Image (cartoon, grey):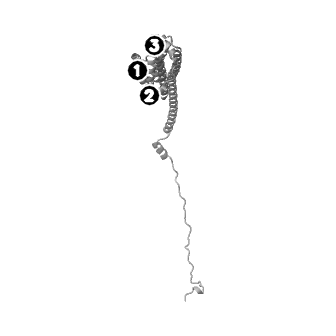
Amino acid sequence: MNPSDKVTVLTRAGSRLADDAGTLSQDAIKLLEDLYAHARDSAKGYRESAESSTSGAMKARLFGMARRRNAMAGQLELTMRSLGIETGHDGSIGDTLRRYFEDLKNKLETGDMRGAIAGIIRTEGQFINNIEKALRETLPDAIHGFLERQQRQVKGAMERFSSEISSRDRVAALRQKAIQYRKPALFALAAVGVGALAAVLIIQQRRNGAVTRSLATARGALDRALTQLPSASQMRKSIEGIHMPSLRMPDMSMPNFRKPTMPSLSGIKLPAFFRLR
């Protein structure tokens, strides 16, 4: 035990402590020894479990529990020695707690916070029962008051853990209900989607049918119009039977055309500057 973890020791006069020690029954002494062993072993177990935790919040809580439990063990040890009671360790209690803390560390390492909290509640509940057994014995007033304070502290921590695990269960239940309600909603949504798709396909099919019928009607009309047209032989016969009147071109004669003659240049007198010298 670290000296820094020790709290103020229960104080009484030496003669009063000696008188109180003489009034303790063997059952009361055995219960105090068991409480001391449990407090000492659980302080070590919570410290090692905190080191194994993957959750920062849980790590801090376990370290806090280890410090408080270590302080309780130190105070019990000093008080029992003052009463002349040996603080020997019962191996069976140590083995039981060792198995519990091994299981707690495994749950913390795997992230099973609900299982870890449930284990803490169980072992702390057992520790409260041991304190109640000791309180039913005849104890010095100082030890009795000290154990009552420790009992209230452990109960408060256990109630906080119980509230937390209840909250986790409610969240898990709500999540499960959400999953259950979500399945029918998904089915309904899928049904609506399938229905909408089927409606689109039907409408498209009807539109395609209307277009097909319109095309068929137009094609039938075209075929009927083509059947009413005469064939090529009929057209040739019709053309051959047509009497074409003879056309006579009117006589056309060209008027008399005299070839122009160039005037004689012999009678033309040129200016002096055009004359050849």
Q: Earlier in the sequence, mark 3 or mark 2?
A: 3
Which numbered disc covers residue 245? none
The amino acid at mark 2 is Glu
The amino acid at mark 3 is Ile
**Disc 3, SS:** helix
Q: Quadrant of the C terminus?
A: bottom right
Q: Earlier in the sequence, mark 1 or mark 2?
A: 2
According to the picture, the residue beneath numbered tag 1 turns out to be 98
**Disc 2, SS:** helix
Query: Compared with residue 167, is residue 22 higher up or lower down, i.e. above or below?
Result: above
Image coords of residue 207 (percent x, y): 52, 32
> Counting other residues with Cα less than 10 Å from the Cα at mark 3, is it few (<14), some (14-19), or many (20 or more)?
some
Image coords of residue 128 (percent x, y): 49, 16
**Disc 1, SS:** helix
Q: Earlier in the sequence, mark 3 or mark 1?
A: 3
Q: Quote the CA–CA distance across marks 3 and 1.
A: 23 Å
**Residue 181 appears in the picture as rendered:** no
Query: Compared with residue 164, is residue 254 higher up or lower down, i.e. above or below?
Result: below
In the depicted view, which residue is nearer to us: 135 or 258?
135
Dot 3 and dot 2 residues touching (CB under 8 Å):
no
- Residue at image location 42% in from the left, 19% down from the top: 97
Q: Quote the CA–CA distance across marks 3 and 2.
A: 34 Å
According to the picture, the residue beneath numbered tag 2 turns out to be 51
Q: Say left or right for 106 vs 10.
A: left
According to the picture, the residue beneath numbered tag 3 turns out to be 29
